[in-house]
Image (spheres, rainbow, N blue to C red):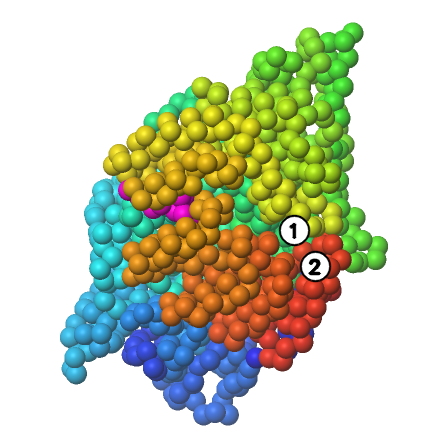
Amino acid sequence: MRTESSPTISRNDYQPYPYALPRVELTFDLDPACTRVYSRLHLERQSESPEPLVLNGEELALESVSLDGRRLAVSDYRLEDGRLTLFPEAARFVIELVSTCRPQENSTLMGLYVSGDHLFTQCEAEGFRRITWFPDRPDVMARYTVRLRADRARYPLLLSNGNLASNDELPDGRHEAVWEDPHPKPCYLFALVAGSFDCREQSLDKDGGGQALLQVYSDRGSNSKTAWALACLEHAVRWDERRFGLKLDLDRFMIVAARDFNMGAMENKGLNIFNSAYVLADKDTATDAAYRAIEAVIGHEYFHNWTGNRVTCRDWFQLSLKEGLTVFRDQEFSADMLAQGLTGTEARSARAVKRIDDVSTLRIAQFPEDAGPMAHPIRPESYQEIGNFYTATVYEKGAEVIRMQHTLLGEAGFQAGMAEYFRRHDGQAVTCDDFVSAMESVYTRLHPGKTLAVFRRWYSQAGTPRVTVEVSWDPAQQACNITLTQRNAPAGIEKLQDPPTAKPPLHIPFAIGLLTREGKPITLHHEGRQSDTALLELTEASHTWTFTGIPESPVVSLLRNFSAPVIVEYERPDTDLALLARHDADPFARWEAGQALASRQLLAMMKTGEAPSALFIDTWQALLLDADITDAYRARVLALPSDRELLEKTTPMDPLAAVRACRHLQSALGNRLTPYWMDVYRKTAADAQADYSPDPASAGRRALKNLALSYLMAAGHPDAAELARMQYDVASNMTDRMGALSCMLRYGASGVAIQVLDHFYQQWQHDPLVMDKWFALQATAPDATVETVRSLMLHPAFSLRNPNRARSVVFQFCMNNLQGIHGPGGYDYWAEQVLALDSLNPEIAARLARAFDSWSRYADAPREGMRAALEHVRGHAGLSRNVSEIVNKALK
Ligand code: PHE
Ligand code: ZN
């Protein structure tokens, strides 16, 4: 345990490892109390003269070290603070190490740990060093042979990466499995699993011949919940063949569900380990959103097999090389799955639903990060704890940066760039720059004279660019001039520098369209092409484009499909926004216009208590009645911005006023449009008893139904409570049940809600994932206070050690219940939970610690309260490096 000033690691300090490690042989004597690991490392020096060999290790007991079969004396090596240094003289040699670790005592869920009756590993980013002494860095790639030994009754199944070479009985009721992984890999992709599991499997004809075995392992008794996961895995394999031409390179691909897991899932080669929340689903326990999330995460981890595993990261500063790219790939996979079987406008609007959800996530999680104390480029320059850099910036903004390259190159060009990337780098550990260079080789071929030199700045600049738009129409010339100006203000820590870092312009692909005053698209002539959408490439601080043949003063549709992760600043009348919300042919920009109109309304209500304008109500009514849009898309366009989104738009931030405004507008809309909501509800509820299917059309219908119910409930409609109760009682699936219950909790009479919650508990108490929902519903209820969450934490089913449970109560309250956390005792509660978690699981604690990143943007009273809580945490002796980095940066 450390206090202040952990060392800062800098990207520019990278040095290649002086040894190659072609082969690794590991033997595990698995035991939850004390596991012994025998490791044999075959090393080859890469330099001319002898170099010290440095291995990493944490929380290990070293029993012996040998060099080429000779046992070393303690004086032959140096053992200090996480490092073991040897002084070999030969150019090739073998090191043998014996050490032990203690899985049962490991509450960090990094390295080898116990979950339920099973043993799991988690090695990314630096967990392998908690298993054995090793060069724990991604640019050291080795072939592994792994021998697992354990008690057969307790651990009948022993899994590791690659192919099973043998499985034999040993004396004393033990057995042994030997796994060989033919693919060289960095140690962060190592995995082992031991325990007793259910398995669902299928074989698959591999593209190009041969068969592969796909398997999903889960806790005994849960096999009925893995059909969807296995189907998603097959879809992912097929999709990657079809769209990216990337084939499964394994004979066996395994997914194992773990109840205790820090993140979503992990792409260990051939042996993915998943948070069970992203594996298990059936109609009674999983919502439509959970089905979609499972598809996305299974896709994500599978896609890492190429983008991450076949080509991996040279060092952890390059994390976005694999994460940004793989998030982009999973987003496209999800979008293609939503649009399956559709064409034209329908396909576009299906894909837009995914885009809307992704952009909402970006805005709520990444934009504030980019504006706060943890702001960093997608390729960070430095860190104290790499675990703190699995961020929305590296993942989600990273995906936007890949998407912009896709936009600039087009699908065919992008695929050519991917092929070039694999041609150059398959089997290597590389950098973000290497990726851009592969793309650039194609870009330059397509556009002679153009490069990605300016584009590369997206990798080194933090902060969200602001793009100001000016539009003028010249009636004499029938021409429309559009000027884009970008501002890249210093972000986060750069603001504190003197002078603040000035930032050069970025390469921003900015898609626009023009509409007539009747809402008809105007064809644009741009760079030799004719289209309703023009892609403007802004590469300087400011640039003006002229479009000719524009017969009237147009309405501009901006940043179509969110073509760049920027904030657009453009003053325009509400009537233009209303027109776009009704007519923009780009479904993303259309949604965006409605949201902008709603945000204006909400901000006005916060300031002056103003009632919603007739224009606004009319717009929502028109969207309710538009016969041409799908239920899923309608559910998105009719939803209001969340209180957290609204809060981000206020200065200083006033959380309670944001909550009030959102509720007020929701109830006003519910009231003013009651018959329409009722009609939508009746139509969409009609098929509640039909067989459940998570397909996009049915899920869209349920989403719209639940939205209509929430408006009716918010309005206090006399029949609404009864409708909700009935929906709960007759529900044939979890989406309907949760939809009703959450409406009751949010808007209903508390007595009824308590009764229903109790019924829900009686019915689902045996199912941990459903119980997470039960806890989360209560922690986010508008009347939940610190007392409420404290009493939830006293429930026998609560445990801070299980990350999903901690997230469902503590995180939900601190991050998703604005009234609760900013109410009496909220800040003290947060500090207390950060410290409690830190002594168990620093990675999770540090995520909670980030809840107050934006403290300095709040109004006086909350600001001072949050600052005091942060200072309290910072003053605590023995903080982990993880939490210490976060609170120190927050208080800088
Ligand atoms: N690499 C994992 C993913 O994004 C995330 C992860 C990071 C999981 C660290 C566990 C630990 O797919
Ligand atoms: Zn990933």
**Element on which disc 2 rests:** helix
Point out which mark residue 254 bears. Answer: none
Q: Residue at x 63, y 18 (%)?
A: 514
Viewer-side residue, 470 vs 43: 470
At label 1, which amino acid type do we have? Pro
Instruction: Write the start and end of the magenta stretch as one range.
Output: 732-742
- Does the magenta-highlighted stretch encompass residue 140? no
Image coordinates of residue 393 in percent, x first then y, are: 59, 51
Q: Residue placed farthest to the right in the image?
A: 499
Q: Residue at x 60, y 54 (%)?
A: 819
Q: Quadrant of residue 891?
A: bottom right
State whether the magenta stretch is mostly helix, strand or loop: helix
Q: Are marks 2 and 1 in contact (CB under 8 Å)?
A: yes
**Element on which disc 1 rests:** helix
Q: Residue at x 52, y 76 (%)?
A: 839
Image coordinates of residue 543 in percent, x first then y, are: 75, 28
Q: Is residue 658 visible?
A: yes
Point out which mark residue 862 bears. Answer: 2
Point out which mark residue 655 bears. Answer: 1
Viewer-side residue, 634 vs 278: 634
In the image, is the residue at mark 2 within 8 Å of ligand 1 by its beta carbon?
Answer: no
